Amino acid sequence: MISILIIMLIVFTMVYTMVPRENIFFEDSTYRKLGGKSDDKTEYVYSTWQKLGYLDYVRINDYCLTLYEAGSEDMVRAVSPDSQESQDFVALYTSKGYTVDKYLQSGRYYAYKDIPVINRMLSWLGSLIKIDTPWSVQDPDNPDLERKLYFGRTPTGGVALMGSGTTHKYLLYTDSHFPFIHQNIIKLNFGTSYPTYQGLDVISVLFQTQGTEVKRHVVFETGYEADSGINFGSLRYKPVLDRMDKKKFTDHYAAYDVRKNQPSMIGTSFIMGIFALMMAYLIGLPMGVLMARRKDKLADKLGMIYIIFIIAVPSLAYIYVFRYIGTTVFNLPSVFTTYGPEDIRSWILPIISLALPSIASLMLWTRRYVVDQMNSDYVKFAKSKGLNQREIFGRHIFKNAIIPIAQGIPASLAGCITGAIITESIYSVGGMGKMLPNAINQYNNVMIVALAFIFSSVSVLSVLAGDIVLTKVDPRISLSEKAGRS
Amino acid sequence: MDMLNNPVQEENLDNLFERADFDELESERIAAPRYSYWKSVWKTFFKNKFTVGVAVLLLLIIGFALIQPLHSGYSPVLTPNINNASMKFLKPSAEHIFGTDHVGNEVFDAVWAGARNSIIISFVCTALNMLIGIPIGALWGFSKKMDKWMIEVYNIISNVPFLLLAMILSYVLGAGMRSLIITMTCTEWIFVAYFIRTQVMIIRDREYNMASKCLGTKTWTMILKNILPYLISVIMTYVSRQIPSLISYEVFLSYMGLGLGTTNASLGRTISLYTSYMNGYPHLFWIPVGVLALISISLYIVGQKLADAADPRTHI
């Protein structure tokens, strides 16, 4: 746990102090539209930085609003640069350690102060887990909002725990989509993505389905009928309702996500990873055993050539070579997007490419462990007892050789979530693996921090899970004993 | 019995023996054949003709990659033939050994200039990683107190996103060879140290080390004299895997646009640049990939064979 915190501190420091903060605007289209040296630009830059937590930003207007009513004569006089209030503002915020500056056009004052990285991280951690309660929504325009929890049914016929005053309408519900029971009570909050995927939560960027909307005929609770891809489970509180919202819904829960036809980023990576993993174990393990049984014969040598090829040749090169073979000989699409994720042909090449290195390393280690076991005394004893080869390999050797391999399974499973950077880039698959390089190139700092957190916690947990698997596979090993040895 | 008791033959008996005086010099000589570790390593290494062939090929490639770019003066920024359509996309021939690319540059020069950078970077990084990783790993494996802390450090360093680090260093230091070398050493050494730690732990508690410890040998002497010599072949195996993997890293980073930058030649960027011409002009793609594969595989094979030769058990 502590190591995750330190990793996050390092990442925070790197992202928020070492990357120049001006860079985040490179990919921002709004910023580009704002002209040369206008006050709007200054205003936009500083308020964006404040939103992202870089600094605390105070304008003279904010200060004067605490003294006078908005729009009053006093207010107008006070915000001008040479008023008494402006002098007070400068004096007050300079004494607080803020840097005071003037807008270029109007000459009015504003003040800002950098927020230390440590504080930023603490506030980030503080808002990381969000629990939805009947008091979550605080809307001054809707003071009569009921605050309760009750059981009901979703429009698609599932049972649900519903809430009023909560952010989500359906807190716990069932429907026909995997994993069938969904919850909206505890949500992770990584902040809002910027500058790419602007306005979207990082979590929904990663988890929401991609592609085009899947429309179907829907009857809303008002009786209004339309073709829509609405996912009823995602209904959220919306403070201001427009005309269409009022046509569809009877209450304030009118914000929703739509179902789209392609799996989410994390889903895409996971599907790809799982199949590649299955392929790797189904091919790698038997091949490794075969190589060990036919040690120094043709099968072993061929396998060795394959392993050396995969280890020595950079992955970029052999993936290209493999893709070339796949596209010319088997007529498969060279990029994922040609046929899209609905077509099975799109998946074949990326999955095999992803499996190639895992197969090689599994073959190598299986061979190593099996060969080691083959020379041990108990195998010689089994042979002298007269057991046949199949029995010895299946019952004796494999059980022992599989132990160190089983430890790696959780880590490989975790690898499915984090995605494959090279494979996904080469085949342009819309998965997680491409997310980190993209976020880095586009200065999406919120996303970088979120991904670093997800990846590091997944990997720390998978190491732990690996140890647990080890004790399950081999009852001789206990974790407490393990502390002293390697 | 008769013979011994016979006084007549006593004289003859004396002649049968030679007087052997104590010879200090002779007593120091060891009867067993002389054994020199490194001589045996080389002898074993050169025994296999295939290995020697690959080693010679590797030396030729490295030598060529180091010298040829100095002669050609290739730089990806210079495109003297960009307006000359007759110089673009030429097939390999006697005049243009590897053909020419989309801006009319010699692929031959581009490939070797890229290979030179890849080789230099991988060698320097491997050397640095080993220099930092081996002493730390050896100490780490020895001290149980240190182990508790270092495992946490390992967890931390191995989880900092590598790409992020590469990008930030290229900001702070500017894209180029220096920042790339720092990127590839400032996290990689921990993996070397971790590997050495495990190896040290395995042989730390062997009897001969226990005995050595009981006799009061200092920790560093034990590491240097008892343990590291034992690990030479394991370390060699690791090095032979590390060099190709660092080349692969460099290629990958350049492919992601985070490597050497646009002003330096790089095999990774060459490959990613030429990929788009794969269907029309396959030589543009296959030649750099082939050269890359050739370098990596021969480096790996020579390294493995050296590691085998470094294992004293093969010297008999």
Image: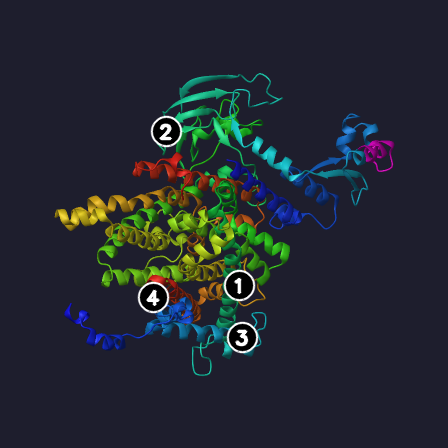
Crowding around mark 2 (Cα neighbors within 10 Å: few <14, some 14 to 19, many 20+) is some
Residue B190: tell me if it is visible: no
Chain letter of disc 1 in the image:
B
- Tag 4 and tag 2 share a subunit: no
* Amino acid type shown at disc 3: Pro
Residue identifier under label 4: B315
| Residues tagged 4 and 2 counted as in contact (Cβ below 8 A) | no
Q: Identify the secondary structure beneath mark 1.
A: helix
Residue A310: tell me if it is visible: yes
Chain letter of disc 4 in the image:
B
Q: Is residue A406 left or right of residue B217?
A: left
* Amino acid type shown at disc 4: His
Q: Position of residue B109 (x, y in %)?
A: 51, 75
Q: Identify the secondary structure beneath mark 3.
A: helix
Residue identifier under label 2: A175
- Tag 4 and tag 3 share a subunit: yes
Q: Is residue A121 left or right of residue A106?
A: left
Chain letter of disc 3 in the image:
B
Crowding around mark 3 (Cα neighbors within 10 Å: few <14, some 14 to 19, many 20+) is many
User: Who's the residue at 82% across and 36% down the image?
Assistant: A90
Residue identifier under label 3: B69
Q: Identify the secondary structure beneath mark 2.
A: loop
Q: Position of residue A345 (x, y in %)?
A: 33, 52
Which residues make up the magenta segment?
A77-92
Instruction: Name the foreground residue: B192 vs A325.
Output: B192
Q: Identify the secondary structure beneath mark 4.
A: helix
State the separation of the CA atoms marked 4 and 3. Answer: 40 Å
Front label number (2 vs 1): 1
Q: Along the polypeptide, which appears first: circle 4 or circle 1?
A: 1
Residue identifier under label 1: B124
